[in-house]
Amino acid sequence: MNVVDKLIENTISTKNPSVIGLDPDIGKIPACYKVNAKRNNPFEAIANVIYEFNRDVIDMVADLVPAVKPQMAFYEKYGSYGVAAFEKTVSYAKSRGLVVIEDAKRNDIGNTAGAYADGHLGCVELLAGSCSPSFDADFLTVTPFLGSDSLHPFIEACEKYSKGIFVLVKTSNTSSGEIQDVVTSDGMTISQRIAKYVSEQAGTFTGEYGYSSIGAVVGATYSEEAVSLRKLMPKSYFLVPGYGAQGGGPKDILPCFNEDGLGAVVNSSRAILYTHMTNEERAQCTRQEYLLSVRTATLKMQEDIYSVLKNEYRQMVY
């Protein structure tokens, strides 16, 4: 199965194009996860807290969302222990039927890009000459600014291993326009030029629903730009960051979708995991209380987005 079809089927079954970002910020994780952490090795203790926290969040939202998006930076900063927690998180999320979008923004050229592609999406060679998956994410975010030869290994991995990528096209951060909005000699912005390239690659990777596993990152904070980018990339799925804590709302994400209500998944991390509770509440709550609040925040996001989509796109397939 084309991995984008899995993402779409999960979206249809949950009636929810929302993605929960698993960004474990130790300073914001409720105290109830940290009080009994083993202290022999502080990095191992943190890794255990991260995995338990992620596992519980996954269990609480697995029936509500199509996918989760762990951001690698929150794991890598704890070295091998954090990466081990990331690997366990990916494996557990997939065991619960969720699509895993690894947000790592990898890129390089030649053999290095190939190594990234093999490690994060494909298989790695072992001593005996056999091959085994390593991180084994379903999708990986990649940056295009080294040019097409840096993206080819990731695209080849998508074809070989039935995986997907989201190429950074228009990101949600406030300074993105310093580079991405620069107008080139043909009158297109950098973002639009990248979108054109993504669309060219997307054509050979379409699944049963007509969408491609070669997708794009398009921020919710730039809805006007999303209109032209959607036209340039009609078959590409969009990963839409910037919803919630960064200021994007339900109406802002509408241009990222097509008339069928498909074409995009919208990520929220802090607004689901942290901002719905005060620091004092997180310090005093039980796990059950915290997780119920996560579920409530997830349901609220689902309701807000679904109702806007349903009102705007009468041809929705779910």
Image: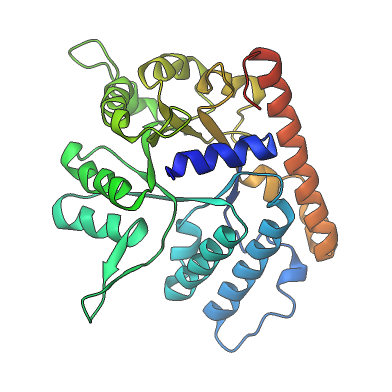
Judge by depth and name the residue closer to the eye, 220 or 152: 152
Instruction: Tell whether 14 sits left or right of 94.
Output: right
Image quadrant holding the N terminus, namely top left
Q: Quadrant of residue 302?
A: top right
Can residue 66 be seen here? The reply is yes
Q: Position of residue 174 (x, y in %)?
A: 47, 30
- Against 163, residue 180 (above or below) is above
Judge by depth and name the residue closer to the eye, 292 or 75: 292
Can residue 18 be seen here? The reply is no
- Against 151, residue 130 (above or below) is below
Q: How many marks?
A: 0
Judge by depth and name the residue closer to the eye, 62 or 55: 62
Q: Position of residue 46 (x, y in %)?
A: 58, 73
Q: Position of residue 224 (x, y in %)?
A: 49, 14
Point 50% across, 59% down: residue: 74
Query: What's the image's color scheme?
Result: rainbow
Judge by depth and name the residue closer to the eye, 263 or 34: 263
Q: Position of residue 167 (x, y in %)?
A: 35, 37
Q: Quadrant of residue 230?
A: top left
Point 64% across, 19% down: residue: 251
Point 39% across, 30% down: residue: 176
